[in-house]
Image: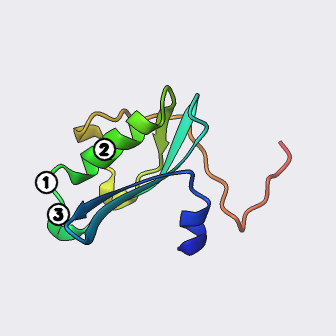
Amino acid sequence: MRTMLANANLVVTAWDADAMVGIARSLSDFAYATYLSDLAVRRSYQRRGVGKALIARIQQEGGAARIILLAAPAAADYYPRIGLRRHDSAWCLWPDEAVTAP
C-alpha cells in the first residue's frame, strides 16, 4: 500500500476531524487522462456524498484531463448514478499474462 500511494501523483482525502473517511488515488498527466485507481469511503460514511466529492476534487485538480477508471464489481452501479459514462473500448492485461502476436 505504501508503494501504491508513493507512486500516485494525485491523491485526495476526506476527513472527519482527525479520522480519514475517504481517499481517491490517481495518476494524471493533467492534460488528457486521469486514471482514478482507487476510490474508498469508510462504510459508515457512504451515501453521504463523500465519494462524489472526492471524484469532483480529482476532476478539479486534474485540469482538462478526462477521468478514466475501472470499477470494482461491487461499485459498478455507483458510477453511472453520479454522472460517469460507461466506455466499451477498454482492455486489461494482468501482470501474469503475456502480450501475444495476432
Q: State the residue at coordinates (25%, 72%).
A: 19
Q: Residue 90 sits in which quadrant? A: top right
* Label 2 secondary element: helix
Spatial CA span between label 2 and label 1: 15 Å
Near-viewer residue (36 or 54): 54
Q: Are marks 2 and 1 in contact (CB under 8 Å)?
A: no
| Residue identifier under label 1 | 48
Q: Of discs 2 and 1, which sits in the foreground?
A: 1
Q: Quadrant of the C terminus?
A: top right
Residue 49 rendering spot, x and y as whole percentages: 18, 49
Q: Are marks 3 and 2 in contact (CB under 8 Å)?
A: no
Q: Which residue lies most toward the right here? A: 101
The residue lying toward the viewer, choosing from 41 and 61, is 61
Q: Nearer the viewer, residue 17 or 4?
A: 17
Give the image location of residue 4, x and y in percent.
57, 66
Q: CA distance from mark 3 to mark 2?
A: 17 Å
Q: Amino acid at mark 2?
A: Tyr
In whole angstroms, how far apart are the C-alphas of marks 1 and 3?
6 Å
Q: Which mark is residue 45?
A: 3
User: Crowding at label 2, few (<14), some or many (≥20) Cα neighbours within 10 Å?
Assistant: some
Q: Is residue 75 left or right of residue 72?
A: left
Which image quarter: residue 24? bottom left
Q: Position of residue 85 (x, y in %)?
A: 37, 32
Relative to 37, is 59 above or below? above
For disc 2, the marked residue is 79
Q: Is residue 40 left or right of residue 8?
A: left
Tell me what residue is drawn at x 53 percent, y 45 percent: 35
Mark 3 or 2: in front is: 3
Q: Are marks 1 and 3 in contact (CB under 8 Å)?
A: yes
